[in-house]
Structure formats: C-alpha cells, structure tokens
C-alpha cells in the first residue's frame, strides 16, 4: 500500500488558494499512490478564530468538501476540514475514493491550553472505527488525538481495538523549541504494532497576538523504521510504501534561524500582501542587529530601511556597529538625530508649566520620539515598523509604550537575551562570516554573562540595562510557568544551586538572602506592572513553550501573595541559602 504524504503549506482563511494546492498535489501524484493524505484543516486553515462561527465561511468550506470528493479517483484522498452534523460543528477528516465519500472521522480530543481553543468551536467525536479501503483497514485521527497522556480516553488505543492495518494522523501542529524531539518521543512511546503515518502542515498562522509556525516533519514510522520529510517549514510531497518503509531523515541545521526567516516571509506575504518596506530602528545593539539581519535575509535588502537615531548619549561603538551592519547587509540606513526634537519637546513642556523635565520622563521622551520617527518614515515609505524587543524586556516592561514597543511584528519577543545571543552566533556560523558584530554577542563564562560592552538603552549618561542577564533570563521563564513557593523552598534547601538559576547567584550577590528577596520582588512586580504594555504590543512569533500573547494569557489584576509565600520569604531572610 503506497501513501502520498502531502506536507502542504496551508494559508489560513484562504480556502480558494488551498483548494488549488490540494488539486495540484492530487494531480501530481495521480495513480502513483493508493491514497494521498493532507493535513488537518487544510482547506480553510486551523487558526481562523471566530470565522468558524460565520455561516458564510462554513458554507464555503463545506462546499469545498464536495470539490475534493470529485477530485478523488483511483488514488484515495484524506483531508482535514470542518463538518456540520445536526447543527454541530466538528474538526473532521474526510476520506474519498473514486468520486465518493468513504467516511468521515471527527476529532475526539479538543485542546484548550496554550494557543488552542478547540472546545470553543467544535464538538468531540467518539467513533474510532477504521475505514475499509482496497482490502485494508485504515484508522484516522487528528492531531491532539495522539497526544493523549492527560486525557481519560486514548483515541489510539480505541482505534487499535478494531485491528486496523494503518493509523493516519493529520495535524496542524505549531513548532516550538525541541518540538520535533517531543513529537517523535510521543510517537515512539506508543510502540504501535502497525505503520503510523503523521502528516503535518507547514506555513504560518496566527491567533492575533501569537504568530505560529508549522514546521512539517511529517513521517511514517513502523517499529525501528522511520521515513521523515523535511522539518524546515517547506512544502513537500513524498510517496512511501507503507509495507516497506525505508529510513530517511532530514539534516537539521540552524532551525530557529530558518524558522524565523520563514515566519517573516510568510507573515509578509499573507498579512501584508502589498509588499511594504520594513522600517527598523538600528541602534547598533544586539537585538536590532539580529532583527535587521533576519529581515534582510528573509526579504532582501531592497525591502529593508534602517534608521539610526543618535542622541547625546549614543556611544561611538553603537554608531559603528549600526553602519557596519548596514554595509555588510546592504540595506539603506538613514541617520536622523533626535536631539532637536527632544529639545523642542522639553521646551514646549516648560512653556506649559513643567519647568523640570528629567529622569524617566526625559528618557521616555527620547524613546517615544524614536518611535514617532520610525512611524513617520514608515508612513513616507508606505511601510511597516518591526519591533526589536526580546522576551525579557517584554516581561519586565523594559520598553516605552508608543516608543520602542511599537511595530507590526515582534520577531524576537519570545527569545530571551541569551537566546538572541545564541541566534546571533547561529546566523554568523550559517553564513561563515561576521554579520552580527562579535562585540555584541554575550559570553557565558560559567557563573557570569560577560559583554564587550554592556547593553544600554542609551537614554541617559552612563545608563545600562538593569537586568541581571543570565539569571533574569531563567527567572522570568521560571515565574511564567513555575511556583514562587517552590523557588523559595529550593533556595532554603540549596537545591536552587542545581538549577539554571543557581550558577549565577554568587556572581550577582544573590547568595545574600536579602538581595535575593529584593530582586525576586522587583522582577515579580515588574512583570505584573507590565501587563498593560504587553496587551498593546505587536504580535509575537511564538517559539517557546510559554510565549506572551495568546499562549501565556494574562489579566490586569493585582498579584495575590499568599501567607505561605510571606512565611517562606521570612525564612529565607533568617536562614539564608541552604547548603547541598
């Protein structure tokens, strides 16, 4: 039995385009395979939000099921789309052969965590019986149905009760760090007695606040054999003999780098189809250098316009880095000093009864004028602005609303500062040259992160970022998904020293319990106070298990500190860091 795996690029809410792709792939396979398998929701896209509730969209998508049935010939077709039964909406897999419907499977497990909201739209299916096809029994499931560890029912085990010959899983599974390894682990853990066909889509979809990448990595596995398609976000069509599976696996290199390039290209093509210029503030720092490089490599130098906006506080090295980057990548760079604009703003405030303009107010004036300048250039160029902030800045609110918090897309907003540094190394390695200046890339020297010159917003004399790089990178991630009480207990018994946080404690003086509690309170407070900023920031490309946006959901509510937390803090202050 030969199966064609259609690792298809699905464009959300573009069913006519998707239908053409489906037709092209069916025609390309013709009769070279017994059946062809397309991904979950390959007709209208998976992440289309409340368009699922719109009757016109439902009617259009349902009508296209008949179009695909008509396309089926000697080669059967399996595809994902909506189904409506007795007024109830289902996430469904359809199976057609020779112009007739063989059967329909309804997704059973409906995820409601992270970016997923299936239960908002769909009802759950409960029929796991396989379909008869050319003398074989083919069982079908949809995405979450194979990730069943936390559910009361296992669609896989239910299907196996019918003794199928093959099990097919169609998916629209967003990629995050190490997703390919966890995906393979889930498949291998099931130790299936029959060939398992996993077909994932590629491309980009979004939930409004989170931009999601599908990497593909479709595969056929049976016992010790695995035939895998590319996991580099590219469309692919392959034919596999399910009874004689040959091992094949793509070589993975610089996956995050490649993923972000595809995210930019796909977002630009689908969300901004008029082909705008991308305007980027090039400060000469690490984040903007990485963003500018990604934009240029993804779209070409002609589509990127850099703007450097020096002030009296701008260091010579950052100016040099900005020009080095533009010359290396070849994009146009405008220099627009902000000094006169700052002076005019301060003068206007003073004449309006505010004689003293200094401190944070003065710093934010500079940041907002830089944002204003970028938006003005974007307006003149019919372009959009890219956001350069990293995940730690986003978490701690270290961005000025209507200043450096602006943009159409945040490329780096789900990467910690250390991860941005690793990405910079990956970019240089992949291109065999120094694109990102080495003086910007941090070094992890065991218990301390070192820089040739420390990161700074350059909004005041001698200013440097207040973050404890390395330590805060890991602390933010811990606080997003962990427990403050558990962290305090680890400090008390010394087991914190065995975590990613532990190696930085002494270098930052956090082995002093008073300093540790003060820093923990500051980070917690900053994260809570910055919620309103994050709600107004641009959509973020999601690459981690917990990214701000639709994945990590927040409300503007006070932080609740329990009596247990207070008691543990008191113990830390009295007992100090425990010894292992």
Image (tube, rainbow, N blue to C red):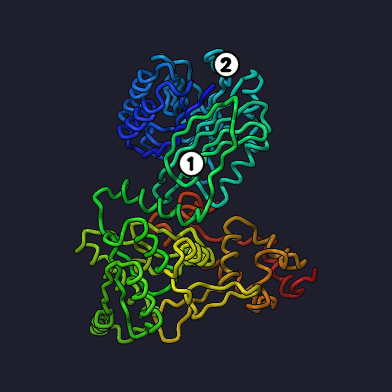
Whether residue 40 appears in this view of the structure is no
Q: Crowding near pointer 1: few (<14 within 10 Å), some, many (20+)?
A: many
- Name the residue located 30 percent from the left edge and 29 percent from the top edge: 56
Q: Dividing the image into 4 quarters, which one contains the C terminus?
A: bottom right
Q: In the rendering, at what x and y percent does residue 133 appear?
A: 52, 15
Marker disc for residue 136:
2
Q: Quadrant of residue 158?
A: top right
Q: Earlier in the sequence, mark 2 or mark 1?
A: 2
- Name the residue located 45 percent from the left edge and 53 percent from the top edge: 258
Tell how many labels.
Answer: 2
Extreme-left residue of the structure: 380
Q: In the rendering, at what x and y percent does residue 501 appear?
A: 65, 67
> Mark 2–mark 1 contact, CB under 8 Å?
no
Work out how far the residue at label 2 is from the one at label 1, CA to CA, in angstroms: 27 Å
Q: Observer-nearest residue: 505 or 568?
A: 505
Q: In the rendering, at what x and y percent does residue 578 appear?
A: 77, 70
Dot 1 falls on a residue whose secondary structure is loop
Which residue is tagged 1? 216
Q: Dividing the image into 4 quarters, which one contains the N terminus?
A: top right
Tell me: residue 220, above or below residue 465.
above
Extreme-right residue of the structure: 580
Tell me: residue 410, above or below residue 185.
below
Q: Crowding near pointer 2: few (<14 within 10 Å), some, many (20+)?
A: few
Dot 2 falls on a residue whose secondary structure is strand
Left or right side of 514 for 311: left
Whether residue 520 appears in this view of the structure is yes
Left or right side of 188 for 97: left
Tell me: residue 147, above or below residue 552.
above
Q: Observer-nearest residue: 182 or 459?
A: 182
Q: In the rendering, at what x and y percent does residue 261 appear?
A: 41, 54
């Amino acid at each position: 039995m030969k199966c064609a795996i259609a690792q298809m690029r699905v464009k959300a809410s573009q069913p006519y385009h998707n239908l053409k792709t489906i037709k092209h792939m069916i025609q390309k396979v013709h009769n070279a395979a017994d059946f062809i398998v397309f991904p979950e929701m390959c007709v209208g896209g998976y992440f289309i939000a409340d368009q699922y509730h719109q009757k016109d969209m439902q009617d259009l998508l349902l009508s296209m099921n008949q179009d695909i049935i008509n396309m089926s010939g000697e080669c059967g077709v399996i595809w994902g789309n909506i189904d409506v039964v007795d007024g109830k909406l289902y996430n469904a897999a359809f199976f057609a052969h020779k112009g007739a419907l063989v059967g329909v499977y309804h997704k059973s497990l409906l995820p409601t965590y992270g970016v997923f909201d299936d239960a908002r739209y769909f009802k759950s299916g409960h029929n796991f019986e396989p379909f008869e096809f050319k003398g074989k029994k083919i069982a079908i499931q949809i995405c979450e149905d194979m990730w069943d560890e936390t559910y009361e029912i296992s669609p896989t085990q239910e299907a196996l009760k019918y003794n199928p010959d093959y099990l097919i899983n169609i998916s629209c599974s967003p990629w995050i760090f190490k997703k390919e390894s966890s995906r393979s682990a889930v498949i291998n853990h099931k130790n299936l007695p029959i060939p398992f066909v996993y077909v994932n889509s590629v491309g980009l979809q979004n939930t409004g606040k989170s931009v999601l990448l599908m990497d593909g990595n479709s595969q056929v596995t049976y016992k010790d054999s695995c035939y895998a398609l590319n996991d580099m976000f590219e469309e692919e069509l392959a034919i596999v003999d399910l009874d004689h599976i040959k091992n094949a696996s793509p070589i993975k290199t610089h996956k995050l780098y490649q993923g972000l390039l595809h995210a930019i290209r796909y977002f630009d093509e689908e969300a901004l189809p008029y082909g705008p210029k991308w305007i980027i503030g090039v400060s000469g720092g690490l984040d903007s250098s990485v963003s500018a490089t990604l934009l240029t490599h993804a779209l070409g130098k002609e589509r990127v316009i850099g703007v450097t906006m020096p002030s009296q506080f701008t260091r010579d090295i950052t100016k040099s880095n900005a020009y080095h980057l533009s010359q290396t990548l070849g994009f146009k760079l405008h220099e627009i000093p902000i000094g006169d604009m700052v002076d005019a703003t301060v003068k206007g405030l003073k004449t309006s009864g505010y004689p003293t303009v200094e401190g944070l107010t003065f710093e934010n004036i500079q940041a907002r004028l830089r944002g204003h300048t970028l938006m003005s250039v974007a307006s003149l160029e019919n372009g959009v602005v890219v956001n350069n902030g990293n995940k730690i800045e986003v978490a701690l609110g270290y961005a000025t609303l209507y200043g450096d918090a602006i943009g159409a897309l945040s490329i780096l907003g789900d990467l910690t500062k250390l991860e941005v540094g690793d990405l910079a190394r990956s970019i240089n390695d992949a291109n065999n040259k120094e694109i990102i200046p080495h003086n910007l890339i941090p070094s992890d020297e065991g218990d301390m992160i070192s820089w040739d010159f420390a990161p700074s917003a350059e909004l005041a004399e001698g200013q440097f970022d207040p973050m404890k790089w390395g330590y805060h990178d890991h602390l933010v991630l811990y606080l997003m998904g962990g427990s403050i009480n558990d962290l305090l207990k680890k400090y008390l018994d010394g087991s914190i020293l065995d975590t990613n946080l532990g190696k930085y404690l002494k270098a930052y003086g956090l082995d002093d319990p008073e300093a540790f509690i003060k820093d923990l309170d500051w980070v917690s407070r900053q994260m809570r106070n910055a919620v309103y900023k994050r709600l107004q920031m641009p959509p973020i490309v999601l690459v981690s298990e917990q990214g701000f946006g639709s994945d990590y959901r927040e409300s503007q509510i006070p932080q609740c500190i329990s009596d247990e937390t207070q008691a543990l803090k008191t113990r830390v202050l009295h007992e100090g860091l425990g010894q292992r």
